[in-house]
Image (cartoon, grey):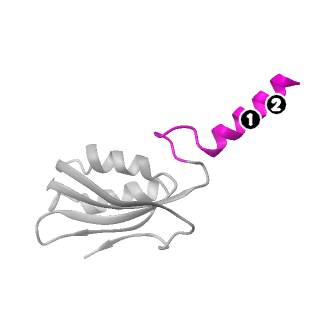
């Protein structure tokens, strides 16, 4: 009996939130980002959109006049997107730094899809 209760409690904890590295299964997250380096003229926005779609994220991405790329991403798999923005990017990009801000839990998505803003 005690083993069954332990297993049920353990399962509930894993389903709710397993670690800092993994997000809660049903929780929605939102964050803003800015990527510095060689990120314009290398299809960074298009690859960002494709990665976001692969991860079922919504939001937008846009070039800035100062040569960076900014955006917002929302959904369940935001940690995977953050890692991609920090370390991968488009094949010809050179990421020097990525900043994140306004990291938060949200009740519902604010966008319908992930768009490239020109």
> Residue, x 22% and y 59% (percent of image)?
43
Percent of width and height locating residue 66: 10, 68
Side (left or right) of 109 relative to 39? right
> Residue, x 31% and y 66% (percent of image)?
71
Is residue 8 rendered magenta in the image? yes
Kindly give the residue lying farthest to the bottom in the view shown.
118
Q: Which quadrant of the view contains residue 34? A: bottom left
Q: Nearer the viewer, residue 105 or 114?
A: 105
Percent of width and height locating residue 65: 12, 72
Local crowd size for mark 2, using a 10 Å CA cut-off: few (<14), some (14–19), many (≥20): few
The residue tagged with tag 2: helix, strand or loop?
helix
Side (left or right) of 108 relative to 10? left
Span highlighted in magenta in the image: 1-23
> Residue, x 61% and y 54% (percent of image)?
26
Is mark 1 in CB contact (under 8 Å) with mark 2?
yes
Percent of width and height locating residue 51: 38, 54
Secondary structure, magenta segment, majority class = helix
Instruction: Name the residue beneath numbered marker 2.
Output: 5
Instruction: Name the residue beneath numbered marker 1.
Output: 9
Q: Which quadrant of the view contains residue 73? A: bottom left
Does 29 appear above or below 117? above
Local crowd size for mark 1, using a 10 Å CA cut-off: few (<14), some (14–19), many (≥20): few
> Residue, x 16% and y 55% (percent of image)?
36
Percent of width and height locating residue 29: 48, 59
Side (left or right) of 26 relative to 113? right
């Amino acid at each position: 009996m005690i083993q069954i209760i332990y297993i049920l409690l353990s399962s509930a904890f894993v389903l709710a939130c397993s670690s800092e590295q993994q997000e809660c299964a049903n929780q929605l997250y939102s964050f803003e980002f800015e990527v510095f380096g060689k990120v314009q003229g290398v299809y960074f926005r298009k690859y960002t959109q494709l990665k976001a779609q692969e991860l079922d994220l919504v939001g937008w991405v846009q070039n800035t006049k100062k040569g960076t790329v900014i955006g917002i991403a929302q959904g369940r798999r935001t940690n995977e997107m953050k890692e991609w923005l920090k370390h991968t990017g488009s094949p010809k990009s050179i990421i020097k730094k990525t900043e994140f801000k306004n990291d938060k839990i949200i009740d519902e998505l604010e966008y319908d899809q992930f768009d490239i803003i020109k």
